[in-house]
Image (cartoon, rainbow, N blue to C red):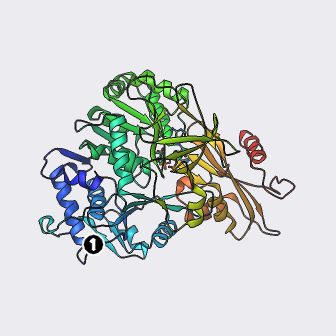
């Protein structure tokens, strides 16, 4: 059953579905408002796959807009205020967005989009006057932008069937029910916050408590009325820092509410075992670590009950078929993880070359090459060893393309060349660091280069340090040797 159909099944129910800054929203109201937004979008007929952007803060209105787009036959594209206008414009142009659904809070930034906007909160169509369009399994539902090894971010297109499979598999694996309450502080423009967290909960009629922003204090406090918490490792690290800085009575209160949670999950990047153990000391249980990707949702998970193995991401979900493929293209014990199954996305939007590189047919299955190097233990638990490309970084749980950041640096008139790498970092997983060389006679400083990046890239993509160098370390073919550069920059940052 697609997420849209499950959502309509909540019609008429008075259970609290969403908690946000405005209070509690019962399911029947959320569904009615989604229908009203759908009615307004489809005034002149079904959207037939039109991409509609959503630029709305986390909360009830966001969910109403998302389902409103789906019930009108559209494809949702989530924009974030974290992106500078130039990036949001790129997403809208790439996806040929014609309308942006927005809120009172974000209307002023929606105005910068050069695309007509609709205030979702002001839509007045009567819900009962609209007959929802029920999407088919293979219809596109979501276009999520993800950074890759080729230039600009690509739109990964997920179908309603992909999302339905995810809702089912993840909901079952973690036994999510209507009695759950998910504490939600993840960004909604990515797979983790939008699908793995929010849609999994909503698919079971569980309530979602959307926190306005990531605030360690608010999160510790909100555990008292939650049952599930999903985090990236940086969040766990920051929560532990706050815990350590709190007085004894607060610590007792925080620990009691964390222990009352029935499930804490971790994903998006590797959870350092020491961080997981410190969490377990306080919350009573090691976080359930799982592996996921924008293109596939959750691929593997440690068990809800039973042996959670620190440093691993557990077994593939039922229905997810995996191969571990070595450099020679053979199945091996260590190599690239390939994934097939109903949750694997449809395609990268209008990127035939990227699609050719991403998918491989084998024994009648269509495998997606994850770009992650993995190994498997005797009980089939997967362990992520790293990425197959040095140009893909993970910082704070965000996937970043070194090439995209390098391209932006090269656009600066003083820069002749740039190389971006990730330096290991306890809190962020990797810290983005750039090395640049300047054009002959040009002068610039790191502040100017950083300001240039900030105008063009989301804050989490901007380098934390820029080193101006006389030359970049290159091999005989002139290619920048990134491992050497990492060593050189590690020495510089430790000085
Ligand atoms: C911010 N800062 C950083 C970084 N980001 N420093 C180093 N590296 C970074 N990446 C600095 C800021 O400059 C600022 O410094 C300080 O940290 C606080 O910044 P702020 O923006 O307020 O950070 P935050 O709100 O504390 O954000 C941390 C965060 C956020 C909540 C962990 O990064 C986040 O929401 N990450 C989640 C990403 C995510 O959802 N990924 C899922 C992708 P100063 O104080 O000096 O100014 S989907 C996926 O991966 C798959 C599907 C999967 O498996 O889940
Ligand atoms: P994204 O493209 O943002 O969806 O990021 C997907 C990538 O995040 C995967 O290909 C992995 O490299 C990484 N990832 C997700 N979960 C984990 C995990 N539990 N441990 C290590 N890496 C992870």
> Looking at this view, is 90 or 1 the one in front?
1
Residue 396 pos. (x, y %): 53, 45
- Residue at the far right: name it: 476
Q: Quadrant of residue 220 in the image?
A: top left
**Residue 427 visible from this viewpoint:** yes
Q: Which of the 4 quarters of the picture holds residue 75?
A: bottom left
Mark 1 residue's CB less than 8 Å from ligand 1: no
Residue placed under numbered mark 1 in the picture: 46
Horizontal and vertical percent for residue 289? 47, 33
The image shows residue 329 at horizontal and vertical percentages of 67, 46
At 52% across and 46% down in the image, what residue appears? 339
Q: Is residue 1 above or below residue 306?
A: below
- Residue at image point 14% right, 68% down: 126
Front-most of residues 71 and 23: 71
Extreme residue toward the front, this view: 363
Could you tell me which quadrant the C terminus lies in? top right
Q: Position of residue 159 (x, y in %)?
A: 39, 58
104 to 474, vertically: above or below: below
Judge from the rendering whether residue 480 lies leftward or rightward of residue 205; answer left or right: right
Q: Nearer the viewer, residue 375 or 421?
A: 375
Say whether residue 79 is left or right of residue 180.
right
Q: Helix, strand, or loop for circle 1?
A: loop
In the rendered image of this protein, does residue 24 appear above or below residue 247? below
Could one spot residue 185 in this view of the protein? Answer: no
């Amino acid at each position: 059953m697609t997420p849209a159909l499950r959502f309509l099944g909540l019609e008429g129910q008075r259970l609290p579905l969403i908690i946000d800054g405005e209070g509690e929203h019962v399911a029947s109201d959320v569904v009615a408002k989604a229908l009203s937004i759908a009615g307004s979008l489809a005034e002149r007929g079904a959207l037939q796959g039109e991409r509609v952007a959503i630029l709305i803060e986390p909360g009830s209105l966001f969910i109403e807009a998302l389902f409103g787009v789906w019930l009108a036959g559209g494809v949702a594209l989530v924009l974030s205020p974290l992106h500078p206008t130039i990036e949001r414009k790129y997403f809208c142009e790439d996806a040929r967005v014609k309308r942006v659904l927005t809120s009172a809070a974000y209307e002023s930034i929606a105005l910068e989009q050069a695309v007509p906007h609709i205030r979702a909160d002001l839509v007045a169509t009567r819900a009962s006057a609209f007959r929802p369009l029920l999407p088919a399994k293979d219809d596109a539902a979501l276009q999520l932008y993800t950074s890759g090894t080729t230039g600009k971010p690509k739109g990964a297109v997920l179908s309603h069937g992909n999302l339905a499979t995810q809702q089912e598999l993840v909901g079952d694996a973690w036994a999510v029910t209507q009695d759950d309450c998910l504490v939600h502080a993840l960004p909604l423009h990515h797979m983790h916050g939008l699908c793995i967290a929010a849609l999994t909960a909503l698919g079971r009629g569980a309530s979602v408590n959307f926190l306005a922003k990531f605030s360690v204090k608010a999160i510790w406090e909100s555990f008292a009325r939650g049952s599930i918490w999903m985090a990236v490792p940086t969040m766990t690290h920051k929560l532990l820092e706050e815990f350590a800085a709190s007085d004894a009575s607060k610590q007792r209160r925080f620990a009691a509410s964390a222990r009352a949670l029935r499930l804490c999950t971790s994903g998006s990047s590797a959870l350092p075992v020491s961080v997981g153990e410190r969490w377990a000391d306080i919350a009573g249980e090691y976080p359930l670590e799982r592996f996921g990707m924008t293109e596939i949702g959750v691929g593997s998970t440690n068990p809800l009950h039973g042996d959670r193995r620190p440093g691993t991401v557990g077994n593939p979900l039922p229905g997810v078929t995996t191969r571990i493929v070595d450099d020679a293209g053979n199945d091996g014990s260590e190599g690239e993880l390939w994934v097939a199954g109903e949750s694997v996305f449809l395609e990268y939007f209008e990127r035939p070359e990227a699609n050719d590189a991403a998918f491989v047919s084998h024994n009648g299955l269509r495998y997606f090459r994850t770009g992650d190097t993995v190994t498997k233990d005797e009980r089939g638990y997967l362990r992520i060893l790293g990425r197959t490309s040095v140009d893909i970084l993970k910082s704070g749980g965000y996937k970043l393309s070194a090439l995209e950041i390098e391209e932006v640096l090269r656009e600066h008139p003083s820069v002749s060349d740039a190389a971006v790498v990730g330096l290991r970092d306890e809190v962020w997983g990797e810290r983005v660091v750039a090395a640049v060389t300047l054009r002959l006679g040009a002068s610039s400083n790191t502040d100017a280069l950083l300001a240039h990046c900030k105008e063009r890239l989301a804050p989490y993509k901007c380098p934390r340090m820029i080193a101006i160098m006389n030359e970049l370390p290159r091999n005989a073919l002139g290619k920048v040797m990134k491992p050497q550069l990492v060593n050189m920059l590690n020495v510089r940052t430790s000085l």
